[in-house]
Amino acid sequence: MSLADDMREAELEANQKQLCKTGAWVESLNDRDRAAIEDFLTAGKPVSHLHGLAVRNGCGAAETRFRAHFRRRCSCFKLEHAA
Ligand SMILES: [Zn+2]
């Protein structure tokens, strides 16, 4: 993943009201896996660690975009920012 790829992805996400790669990945998980992610983050564990686990489990998002998703700064939450 290069900077150009990352920027293009961010731009695509900004122009499309749809789930980002991370959001789509989370959607593809079962309830048990989603609950595990929530528990992981609620416990204050590092998102970088979660990203490593996510990549091993099929998530194709770059870490910067992965972090953006969990900060709600991605296309998944676009409607919340529109005002
Ligand atoms: Zn997202």
Image (cartoon, helix red, strand yellow):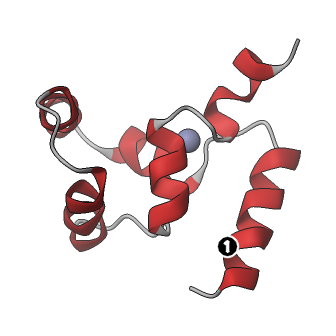
Q: Residue furthest top?
A: 83
Instruction: Give the quadrant of the C terminus.
Output: top right
Please state the horizontal and vertical placement of residue 49, each as a whole percent of the image: 20, 60
Depth check, front residue: 48 or 54: 48
Q: Is residue 37 above or below residue 7?
A: above
Check disc 1 and report the residue beneath it.
6
Residue located 22% across and 72% down the image: 56
Q: Mark 1: which amino acid?
A: Asp
Depth check, front residue: 83 or 44: 44
Q: Is residue 43 above or below residue 81?
A: below
Residue 52 in the figure: left or right of residue 26 = left
Q: Residue furthest bottom?
A: 2
Residue located 41% across and 51% down the image: 25
Residue 15 in the figure: left or right of residue 43 = right
Please state the horizontal and vertical placement of residue 78, each as a whole percent of the image: 74, 29
Q: Residues within 10 Å of mark 1 (few under 14, many from 20)?
A: some
**Ligand 1: quadrant of the figure:** top right
Residue located 23% across and 34% down the image: 34
Res. 5 image quadrant: bottom right
Q: How many marks?
A: 1
Please state the horizontal and vertical placement of residue 46, each as a whole percent of the image: 22, 50
Under 8 Å from ligand 1: the CB of mark 1? no
The answer to whether one can see residue 27 in this image is yes
Residue located 62% across and 42% down the image: 19
Residue 69 in the figure: left or right of residue 49 = right
Depth check, front residue: 67 or 31: 67
Q: Label 1's element?
A: helix
Q: Is residue 82 above or below residue 65?
A: above
Res. 1 image quadrant: bottom right
